[in-house]
Amino acid sequence: MTTEEAVKTAVVLPFLRSLGYDVFDPSEVIPEFTADAVGKKGEKVDYAIKIAGDIRILIECKPISFTLEKKHLDQLYRYFSVTEAKFAILTNGRTFNFYTDLDAPNKLDARPFFVFDVTDFNASIVTELRKFEKASFDVTAILATAERLKYTSGVKKVISSLIEEPSEDFVRLVAGSVYDGRMTAQVREMLMGVVRTAFREVIMDSVKSRLSSALADTEEVIEKIDEPVEDEPDVVTTDEEREGYMIVKAIVRDTISPKRVVIRDQKSYCGVLVDNNNRKPLVRLWFNRSVKYIGLFDGENEERLIIDSLDQIYDHTDRLRATAKKYAG
C-alpha cells in the first residue's frame, strides 16, 4: 500500500462499505469530486459522500508512507467552505483524522476532533465510528460530542506521555511539595522514577476503587432488579441498564444509603429512584435508542446529556451526588 490508489482500494473503500455506503453508486460515493467554486482548475478531493442528497463527508487519501500533517488539509479546507459538507477525513490508510468546523462555522478546523489507528482498535473507537454509519448518520449527534472528543484526545495524549516520560516541569510541580532539597541532576532523575511509579499507582488505585464500589452490595442489587415491575410488566431490563444502575449506585453510596437506591424500568427509559418513589428521581437512563442519554435532576427539570459509554456516567459524579443529597434526609 505504498501508493495513494492502493490506500483507496485496500482500505478506504472497504471502510466505507462497512459503514453502509454503496461504493458502487457514484451518486452516493463520488470519486474524484470537483467543485468549480474552489478556484483551482482540476483540483479534486478523492471522495465526497452524499447522504440524503447532500454532500456531508469529504475524504482525502495519502500514501501510507506519509505522516499526516496540516499541509495535507489544503484541498479539504477549500472544498469544505464551498460545499454542504460537515465532516472531512484525512487518511493514509492506517491513521484516520476526522475534522469539522468547531472553531469557526464553515471553516475546517486545523486539529482533528477524532483520530484512530486501524492497528489499535477498541470498543470506544467503534462507538464513535457507528455515528458515521449511513443508517444512523446524525450531524447534530456527532457535533454534540465532537468538541469533547477533540480536547479529551489531546489531553489523553499529554497524560500518557507524562506517565511514560514525566517532564522536568511536571516533576518539579508534583514533587516540589514533598521534596525540599536542592534539585540536582541525580535527585531529578530519582524523582522522575518516583513520579512515574506514583502516577501509575494512582490510576491503578482509582480503577480498583471503582470496581470495588460497583460490586458492593451485588446481591442486593440483583434482588432489586429481579423484582417484578407493576407498572410496566413487559419491560426487559438490559445488561447495559443494569450496569448503569450499579455505576450510579456506587457513585452515590457515600451520600445516601445504597439500600434506598432502586431501579424501576419503563418502556422508554430506565429510572433510578430513591426510596422507590417517583417523586425522588436520581437519574434516568435513556438507553433504548442509537444515541444514548442520561437524565439528571440536580436542577428544576430533567436535563438530558449524551454519553458515548457507560464510563462517562462517572463524569457527572458531582451532579449525581448533589441530587442524592437532596433526598438524604
Image (spheres, rainbow, N blue to C red):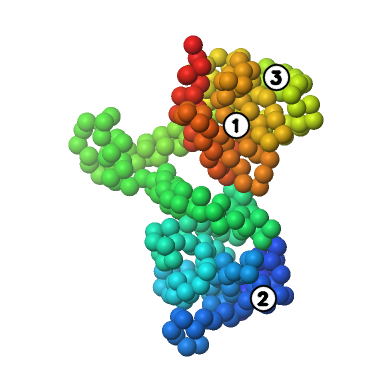
Which residue type does callout 3 highlight? Lys
Above or below, comparing residue 148 to residue 114 in the picture: above
**Tags 2 and 3 touching, CB below 8 Å:** no
In this orientation, does residue 315 appear? yes
Would you say residue 12 is visible in this rendering? Answer: no
Residue assigned mark 1: 284
Assess disc 2: are there few (<14), some (14-19) or many (≥20) residues with their C-alpha within 10 Å of its C-alpha: some
In this rendering, position of residue 221 left or right of residue 43: right
Indicate the amino acid at tag 1: Arg
Which residue is tagged 3?
Answer: 224
The tag on residue 127 is none
- Residue wearing tag 2: 27
Closer to the eye: label 2 or 3: 2
Q: Nearer the viewer, residue 57 or 249?
A: 57
Element type at mark 2: loop
Q: Residue at x 44, y 85 (%)?
A: 40
Give me the residue at 61% from left, 25% from top: 272
- If you read the primary sequence from the N terminus, does the residue marked by circle 2 or circle 1 appear first? 2
Task: Give the image location of residue 288, x and y in percent.
Answer: 68, 40
- The structure residue drawn at horizontal position 31% and vertical position 36%, both measured from the top left corner, is 174
Above or below for 50 versus 157? below
